[in-house]
Image (spheres, helix red, strand yellow):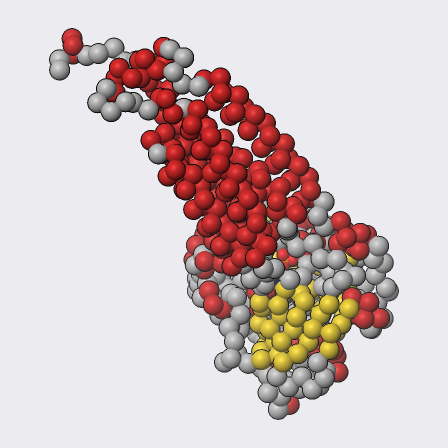
Amino acid sequence: MTDGEKQPRNPRSRLRPALGALSGAVAGFAALAVAELVSAWVRPQAGPVVAVGGAAIDRTPAAVKDWAVRNFGTDDKLVLQLGILAVLALIAVALGVLALTCRRSGSAGMLFFGAVGAAAAIGRPDSTGLTDALPSAAGAVVGAGLLFLLAGRLKILRPAPGRPDATQADTFRGPGWDRRGFVLAASAAAVASAGAGALGRVLNSSSGRDAVASREALVLPAPASPAPAVPRGAWSRILGVSSFTTPNKDFYRVDTALVVPQVDATAWRLRIHGRGVARPVTLSFDDLLRRELIERDITLTCVSNEVGGPYVGNARWIGVRLADLLAECGVTPPSGGGPADQLVARSVDGMTIGSPVEDVMDGRDALLAVGMNGEPLPFAHGFPVRMVVPGLYGYVSACKWIEDIELTTFDAYDPYWVERDWARRAPIKTQSRIDTPRPFARPTAGAVTVAGVAWAQHRGIDKVEVRVDDGPWRQAHLAAEDSRDTWRQWSYSWQATRGGHTLTVRATDRTGAVQTEERARTVPDGATGRHSVVVTVD
Ligand SMILES: Nc1nc2c(c(=O)[nH]1)N[C@H]1C(S)=C(S)[C@@H](COP(=O)(O)O)O[C@H]1N2
Ligand SMILES: [Mo]
């Protein structure tokens, strides 16, 4: 065929795949909307996107998770869910096009992906059983049926065998395909789905009403052992330095929960059992509150925190001393001849976190915390009860939404993160961070305040030094120490000269160990290296 002979393109022939894609999209949207509505009745965590997302998180290798946290920070979960939605949209569109030539295959495809969602929901560690399959199943059935119906309206568009061109032209000219039926059905389905989806959203967001009420009704008793007042000198007034106490709303959040568990404190129970537990117990929230409460300032750190990173925060916690509770249950630490060296905490969402029994019982203020900075724990930070152990990274100590404590051994059991390449034991490494000036800042020549925070929980910070370019290490001023379980602010007055400069910080802890300059990745037991900031002085 030459150019001159080229047939004029029939503009309407492009309509065919577009309408197929549209049917798929409408059917997929309906499926998700119905799933959302049904999940409000089953439980929000059983929805297909949350279930598949949770399964994806659990199967993500440590290195990829680390990359996601590094690039998307706390938005990593949002990015994951948007990614899943994008993939589902592509699949739905493809099934819609497929349904043009074979309606049954298109619908079967919908059912297949529904089955994948259902399997993911049932397979979640916090699954409550077969009912968790319902949202995906109901969504898939509705999506499959709708696609079948919509593709039926378009059926006449299918080219007759041997006469592809003629059929298309005829079809679009005449009354052939059921244009009215298609448009009506598609718009009705889209509107109904939007309604169902919105209703599901509203119901889902009110599903934790009992939990919210139990938190609002909670008045924390005054601690029998209050935290000493923070020394006045612990708060520097330097602009740009992290505040000594991190407000709850600014506190970093790291967990695998796509839907924050909302636990009703009045129905909450904690079971303590396992090896060497002579007297296992099950405690209610009131049982905990009736015990002696202690209040302590403790700085929490995530093992995923890069050198200079943001996943560290300091709060004033109120809680029950875990060691006393364990001792009452008859637990003896390994140093006293006890048979269990690992304490495995389990949360309502199926997370498992293992801590050394020795550390929990060595006299440090390991807490079952109920309060954070003067209020009940926020839901995102573990309401009603979480663990906090000074000196250990969060993934080996700080179980949120805790509901079970099992005494076992490191040989017998690997908890969640350990199964995913992270170390069994992980004390927090000595670290320091420059908060001001910010990277690539342009301060003016003269006195410039360099300042930040340093931490070595449960050992304490002894010294912080700053170096400009390759110059000598100069001692920084250390703010007063609150406790050796908290971070310390530091500052250094720098006589800045014009040009580009690199500022570097290092801390020395109370054991005399100097923060190493050797760079290590966060996996498997925490990053090392020194934080540097490059600035240009004008
Ligand atoms: N149930 C549960 N608890 C958890 C986690 C989790 O994923 N699920 N993440 C842990 C990790 S890795 C850290 S660093 C801390 C973070 O606590 P935060 O979110 O209150 O700052 O919680 C720990 N407790
Ligand atoms: Mo963490």
Outermost residue toward the bottom?
Answer: 337
Left or right: 303 in relation to 280: left
**Picture layout, residue 101 above or below residue 76:** above
**Picture layout, residue 499 above or below residue 230:** above
Left or right: 52 in relation to 209: left
At horizontal 44% and vertical 24% (from top left) the residue drawn is 153
At horizontal 16% and vertical 10% (from top left) the residue drawn is 5
Q: Position of residue 451 (x, y in %)?
A: 62, 52
Picture quadrant of ligand 1: bottom right
Left or right: 108 in relation to 282: left
Q: Total marks drawn?
A: 0
Viewer-side residue, 26 vs 188: 188
Q: Is residue 491 visible?
A: no
Q: Quadrant of the N terminus?
A: top left
Left or right: 312 in relation to 57: right
Viewer-side residue, 107 vs 272: 107
Q: Is residue 379 visible?
A: yes
Q: Position of residue 192 (x, y in %)?
A: 60, 30
At horizontal 84% and vertical 54% (from top left) the residue drawn is 217
Viewer-side residue, 11 vs 171: 171
Q: Position of residue 73 (x, y in %)?
A: 54, 48
At horizontal 21% and vertical 22% (from top left) the residue drawn is 162
Image quadrant where residue 510 sits = bottom right
Image quadrant where residue 7 sits = top left
**Picture layout, residue 278 above or below residue 239:** below
Outermost residue toward the top?
Answer: 4
Viewer-side residue, 198 vs 238: 198
Q: Position of residue 16 (x, y in %)?
A: 36, 22
